[in-house]
């Protein structure tokens, strides 16, 4: 089976069909990323936008679970995101340094 057969055809991308309420997930994800980005840009902290966008994606984790389980899932996902940023921060170049320079 070729890889091209696994990809949707362009007609399928434009077709209206049952969506299983996925438009609410898209709306919630767009708002959870867009609002922090707009606030950071408006306040002059747009350099933090990458972290806000990555952190905002925790809103989509556990979307089909109950509230209590979703709270636990989102807390675990948020903790993993924060841990990844904290562990990788010492490896980032400091201002004035290029990549690969110490």
Image: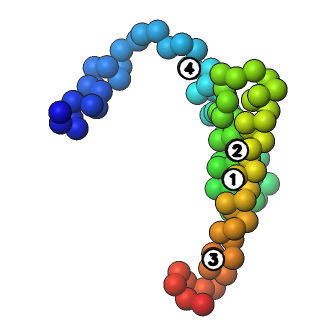
Q: Do callouts 4 and 3 mark residues in contact (Cβ within 8 Å)?
A: no
Alpha carbon separation for disc pair 1 and 4: 24 Å
Q: Which residue bears the numbered disc 2?
A: 77
Q: Which residue bears the numbered disc 1?
A: 81
Label 1: which secondary element: helix
Reply above or below: 71 against 54. Answer: above
Label 4: which secondary element: helix
Q: Earlier in the sequence, mark 4 or mark 3?
A: 4
Label 2: which secondary element: helix
Reply above or below: 13 against 91. Answer: above
On the rendered image, what quadrant is the C terminus found in? Answer: bottom right
For mark 4, does the 10 Å Cα neighbourhood hold few (<14), some (14 to 19), or many (20 or more) residues? few
Q: Which mark is on residue 91?
A: 3
Asked whether residue 4 appears in the rendered view, the answer is: yes
Residue 19 percent coordinates (x, y): 50, 14
Which of pointers 1 and 4 indicates the residue nearer the eye?
1
Q: Which residue bears the numbered disc 4?
A: 22
Q: Which mark is on residue 52?
A: none
Residue 43 percent coordinates (x, y): 79, 54
Q: Earlier in the sequence, mark 1 or mark 4?
A: 4
Reply above or below: 68 against 49. Answer: above
For mark 2, does the 10 Å Cα neighbourhood hold few (<14), some (14 to 19), or many (20 or more) residues? some
> Which residue is the extreme one toward the bottom?
102
Which of pointers 4 and 3 indicates the residue nearer the eye?
3
Residue 44 percent coordinates (x, y): 76, 59
């Amino acid at each position: 089976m070729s890889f091209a057969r696994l990809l949707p055809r362009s007609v399928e991308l434009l077709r209206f069909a049952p969506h299983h309420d996925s438009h609410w997930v898209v709306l919630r994800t767009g708002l959870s990323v867009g609002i922090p980005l707009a606030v950071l840009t408006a306040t002059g902290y747009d350099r933090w936008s990458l972290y806000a966008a990555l952190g905002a994606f925790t809103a989509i984790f556990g979307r089909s679970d109950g509230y209590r389980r979703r709270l636990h899932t989102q807390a675990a996902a948020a903790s993993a995101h924060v841990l990844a940023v904290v562990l990788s921060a010492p490896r980032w170049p400091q201002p004035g340094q290029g990549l690969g320079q110490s």
